[in-house]
Amino acid sequence: MRRELLRSHLDLMVLAVLDRGPAHGYRLIRDLERRSGGTFNLPEGTVYPILHRLENEGLVASRWAIDQGRRRRVYALSAAGRAALKRSRAEWRQLVGAVDTILRGA
Amino acid sequence: MAIIDGYLDRLAQALQAREVPTARLLAEADDHLREAAARYKQLGFAEHHAQHRAIADFGPVDVIAEAFAVASRPWSIAREARAEEGGPRMVELEIVGVVAEPMSEADRQRWGAQIEALADAPEGPVGVTGDVPDMKHGVRLRERDGNRTLCIYIGPAEALAIAIGEHGPAPPRPMTHDFIGNLVRSLGDVSVQRLVITKLERETFYAELEISHGDERIAIDCRPSDGIAVAVRLGVPIFATAAVDPAFEAA
């Protein structure tokens, strides 16, 4: 898939994956890859800046945790993040519905 | 893990060059790369192949560092401008004013040669008479945190545009730089961040107008005169890079 297309919806995808439970960066990226059916093909390192930005915006909270003997930064959705996800999800469905209806008619 | 360690060192350097805090990202990248390499090893890759693959998936150092620089916005212009040991140094400038001076003999000769060349060109512009103007125009800028000044010679139309932008009165119809300013203001998620005078080459100054569009930062090549005329209309700061330093005059 074209990278710009993917990139512009990455915030929403990251929030949606975190909605299933807290995760550290590596696991979140593996989840994104698996749940997108392999469509996710951005440099994996670019997901971290997104996580940091979402945290600055208050949509995500993070803390250091010891997981399998390693110190890791674990990310979780905040209440504001959950609300933003709900709103964005509704907008996304509406948009996809509208575009799809038009494309079918074309 | 020598290959991964080397990558992390380069990433640290690239982040430092962009003045992005490194500690947390490096810890995360380190953890990520080791885990990714371990997975490739489980899949049967030799140690060094596993490390290379993990790095390739993670992305080129500059791409990642740039993504971080963008994500750590809103960037503080003051922070970027501050002289940092070993880092690129920029000085913020303010406009002293537009100047008009009589042409010196050297100026007249240089101008005369240019005008003759234009007038003689087979498809040269119509109406070039070969007259050398009497005056030359410039804009004088001063360091905000110092007394040194910088004079950039510019065209009369641009000098007028800067003077009007600074002091008014607004022209009855939008002039070119008013139009450019209005154009930028009308675009929702586009904003001009600053003008940077980047270099001086063969008596010509170069500048870039830095624009942000969503997460992207775009630098647009321009003449300093056009950039300054737009900057005063949009109220954005003006900077000069260290490359321009030799052109400053002591107060």
Image (cartoon, coloured by chain):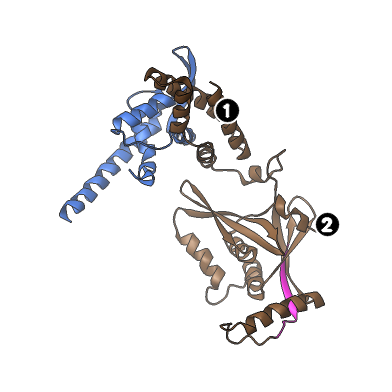
Question: In the rendered structure, which amino acid carries the disc numbered 1?
Answer: Gly
Q: Residue at x 83, y 57 (%)?
A: B250
Question: In the rendered structure, which amino acid carries the disc numbered 2?
Answer: Ala
> How busy is the neighbourhood of tag 2: few (under 14 within 10 Å), some, or many (20 plus)?
few
Q: Position of residue B208 (x, y in %)?
A: 60, 57
Magenta segment: B131-140
Horizontal side of residue B145 vs B193, given as left or right: right
Q: Earlier in the sequence, mark 1 or mark 2?
A: 1
Q: Nearer the viewer, residue B224 or B113?
A: B113
Q: Main secondary structure of the magenta part?
A: strand
Decide whether residue B137 is among the magenta residues: yes
Q: Give residue B236's quadrant in the image.
A: bottom right
Q: Chain of mark 2?
A: B
Q: Position of residue A32 (x, y in %)?
A: 34, 31
Chain A painted colour: blue
Q: Position of residue B193 (x, y in %)?
A: 57, 52
Q: Residue at x 38, y 44 (%)?
A: A3
Q: Are marks 1 and 2 on the same chain?
A: yes
**Disc 1/disc 2 C-alpha distance (Å):** 45 Å
Q: Nearer the viewer, residue A94 or B120?
A: B120
Q: Find numbered disc 2 in the image and state the secondary structure of the residue it sits on.
A: loop
Q: Which residue is mark 1?
A: B6
Q: Nearer the viewer, mark 1 or mark 2?
A: 1
Q: Quadrant of the C terminus of chain B?
A: bottom right
Q: Residue pushed farthest front? A: B46
Q: Nearer the viewer, residue A66 or A63?
A: A66
Q: Which residue is mark 2?
A: B250
Q: Find numbered disc 1 in the image and state the secondary structure of the residue it sits on.
A: helix
